[in-house]
């Protein structure tokens, strides 16, 4: 079946791309810096006319990664375990009608999907069903449904607490609508918060930041059209507003994300570029004291493209920049207000002007370091070419020699038989695969087909080690 999809990709070469390094500032015609193109699937291939949000799921059973992509008419599921040859597994159709807006989050191996389609509610889908797709693409059905609200702009999930929060719904003045999803197939209404009016988007965390007054509490940061609000929602029956903060030249307070230490909050305003003629503006707040948040600094990008959803991983801020594609900022020296552009991948090469075409969302949280980009270009998968593609685990139970190697490589296990050895290029493509049934703790593999370079050797799906071939 995978060969069949490769054949399809060759037919639809106008719409699909695969494994193109960023060289001299482009990859298959897409402007880029520090990010390589792995693969792409068009909206047409997913039988949709527009794309929006995205999220990811990693199967805890085998580590396979899946992309969940919002479309006007449903939610697409894509197997990206082979990032060069993704497989479109199928679609969960919208609960009611098509809509420009759809949002997806994941909790406990279930996807939760909302939309601004009338009476859509929240769909619940068991992601483990993706393990058994034999004839893609399939049309899926939802496993459960929550109808405590109709339309919603977004859904936020705190995986630590097991609560989902519908925002921009027709309840609680558009403020967060609390849903207990600890039993994913039986979502239960748990109240809401209406004191700060409409929330367009939010992040909810179990707080571990510098303000000791709130350590361990469940804190919501709402992007509420013209200000950012901070609310303690630990007690679902008695949520307490903590503080609010605005800023100069407000267009539309759209979405933001904490740094990993929860000291700073990074905000995107969706229409300031449109209303005031700015280049892409990213706003940074100091949230050291949640009762008294402060403006910290702002960064102006190289184009006038509008910023949309953004997320933090380590010392980088990844955000969808509409006509400028994926944009990535280096925030390693945020304390000293030193922000710089790290890289980008432009999925809308025809223009960087103010507009709403291009990239709607990015998902940078996979262990593989592969990054989803979704929007009007459909699904695109890219990778930072300064990162190894597969996480190297610390595991001393397996050794391999020689390293560097040329013609052969020996794998030794101190605890169990060597059952499988996979070799990947640094772009994430599996180039060799060996399966063993002899129950030996030492196996020798032939690697003379490999060109000189750096590879990743995955052993028994437990550990990954770097290999240099000379």
Image (tube, helix red, strand yellow):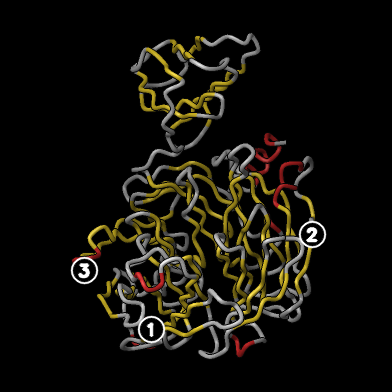
In screen coordinates, is 24 left or right of 76? left
Residue 284 visible? The answer is no
Neighbour tally class for label 3: few under 14, some 14-19, many 20 plus, Cα within 10 Å:
some
Q: Give the quadrant of the C terminus.
A: top left
Give the residue pinned by disc 3.
Answer: 337
Residue at image position (52%, 67%) is: 360
Find residue 293 and report its image quarter: bottom left
Q: Give the quadrant of the N terminus.
A: top right
Q: Out of 285 and 71, give the one closest to the viewer.
A: 285
Asked if 158 appears above or below 343 in the picture, the reply is below
Asked if 40 appears above or below 21 in the picture, the reply is below
In screen coordinates, is 380 left or right of 22? right
Residue 364 visible? The answer is yes
Structural distance between the alpha carbons of marks 3 and 2: 47 Å
Structural distance between the alpha carbons of marks 1 and 3: 21 Å
Secondary structure under badge 3? loop
């Amino acid at each position: 079946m995978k060969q069949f999809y490769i054949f399809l990709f060759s037919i639809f070469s106008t719409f699909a791309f695969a494994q193109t390094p960023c060289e001299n500032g482009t990859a298959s015609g897409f402007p880029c810096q520090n990010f390589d193109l792995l693969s792409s699937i068009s909206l047409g291939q997913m039988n949709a006319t527009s794309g929006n949000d995205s999220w990811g799921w990693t199967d805890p059973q085998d580590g396979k990664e899946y992309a969940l992509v919002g479309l006007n008419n449903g939610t697409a599921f894509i197997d990206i375990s082979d990032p060069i040859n993704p497989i479109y597994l199928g679609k969960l159709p919208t609960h009611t009608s098509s809509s420009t807006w759809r949002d997806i989050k994941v909790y406990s191996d279930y996807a939760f999907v909302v939309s601004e389609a009338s009476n859509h509610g929240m769909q619940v889908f068991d992601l483990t069903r993706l393990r058994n797709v034999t004839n893609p693409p399939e049309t899926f059905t939802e496993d459960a449904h929550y109808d405590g609200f109709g339309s919603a702009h977004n859904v936020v999930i705190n995986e630590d607490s097991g609560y989902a929060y519908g925002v921009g719904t027709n309840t609680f003045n558009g403020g967060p609508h609390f849903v207990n999803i600890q039993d994913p197939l039986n979502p239960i209404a748990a109240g809401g918060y209406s004191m700060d009016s409409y929330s367009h988007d939010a992040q909810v965390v179990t707080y571990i930041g510098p303000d000791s007054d709130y350590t361990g509490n469940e804190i919501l940061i709402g992007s509420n059209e013209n200000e950012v609000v901070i609310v303690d929602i630990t007690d679902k029956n008695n949520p307490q507003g903590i503080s609010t903060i605005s800023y100069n030249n407000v267009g539309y307070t759209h979405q933001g994300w904490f740094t990993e230490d929860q000291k700073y909050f990074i905000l995107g305003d969706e229409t300031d570029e449109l209303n005031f003629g700015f280049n892409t503006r990213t706003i940074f707040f100091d949230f050291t004291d949640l009762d008294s948040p402060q403006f910290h600094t702002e960064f102006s990008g190289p184009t006038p493209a509008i910023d949309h959803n953004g997320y933090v991983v380590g010392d980088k801020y990844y955000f969808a920049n509409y006509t400028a594609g994926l944009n990535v900022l280096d925030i390693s020296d945020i304390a000293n207000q030193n922000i710089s552009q790290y890289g980008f991948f432009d999925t809308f090469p025809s223009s960087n002007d103010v507009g709403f075409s291009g990239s709607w969302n990015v998902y940078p949280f996979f262990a593989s370091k592969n990054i989803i980009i979704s929007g009007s270009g459909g699904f695109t998968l890219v990778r930072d070419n300064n990162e190894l593609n597969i996480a190297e685990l610390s595991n001393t139970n397996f050794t391999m020699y020689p390293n560097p190697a040329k013609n052969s490589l020996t794998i030794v296990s101190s605890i169990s038989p060597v059952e499988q050895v996979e070799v990947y290029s640094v772009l994430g493509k599996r180039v060799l695969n060996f399966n063993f049934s002899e129950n030996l703790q030492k196996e020798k593999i032939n690697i003379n087909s490999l060109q000189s370079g750096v590879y990743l050797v995955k052993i028994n799906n437990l550990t990954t080690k770097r290999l240099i071939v000379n």
